[in-house]
Amino acid sequence: MRRVRSVGLLLVGLALIGGVVGCTGDQALTAEQARATASQKYDYDYVKRQAKQLQPGLSKAEVLILLGSPAQREAARWIYLPKRSGLIVPAEALVVRFLNGRYDSHATEPTVLGERLGN
């Protein structure tokens, strides 16, 4: 009986520690992601579904209509991010590439804490 009680207390303690660490990580992650995704119009899952409709040669305006505004905009690529990045296990970002101002391709790249791991 005493051993069961000790194991139970240990599990409760671990759960509390995990909850505190998880909350702290989520709060920091939320602040980081809020900055990165503030300008992104649509939810990441929606963007990924819509990206299936992209066709080479679309103008940036047409891509904008389909996917909405990105979290990060560069001259030759737009980056769409999930609201919550990977903390331990990488999440992903959708990178849309343009060539001469027209849609060329898109791919997902791994991210950790909102930072892309790819180029």
Image (cartoon, rainbow, N blue to C red):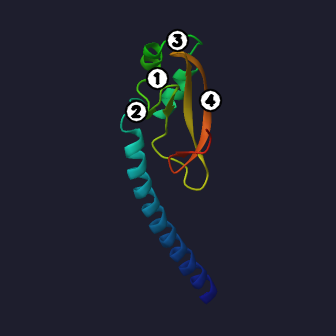
What amino acid does circle 2 point to?
A: Gln
Mark 3 touches mark 2? (CB < 8 Å): no
The amino acid on which the numbered mark 1 sits, given as a three-letter code, is Leu
Q: Quadrant of the N terminus?
A: bottom right
Label 4, label 2: how far apart the Cα atoms are: 17 Å
**For mark 2, what is the residue?**
40
**Dividing the picture into quarters, in which one does residue 94 lie?**
top right
CA distance for labels 4 and 3: 16 Å
The reply to whether discs 1 and 2 touch (Cβ–Cβ < 8 Å) is no
Nearer to us of marks 3 and 2 is 3
- Most foreground residue, 62 or 84: 62
Gap in angstroms between the C-alphas marked 3 and 2: 20 Å
Query: Dot 2, crowdedness within 10 Å: few (<14), some or many (≥20)?
Result: many
Q: Is residue 89 left or right of residue 25?
A: right
Which residue is label 1 attached to? Answer: 67
The residue lying furthest to the bottom in this view is 2
Q: Circle 4 sits on which residue?
A: 107
Q: Secondary structure at mark 3?
A: loop
Q: Amino acid at mark 3?
A: Leu
Cα distance in 3D space between marks 3 and 1: 12 Å
Of the image marks 3 and 1, the number of the one nearer the N terminus = 3
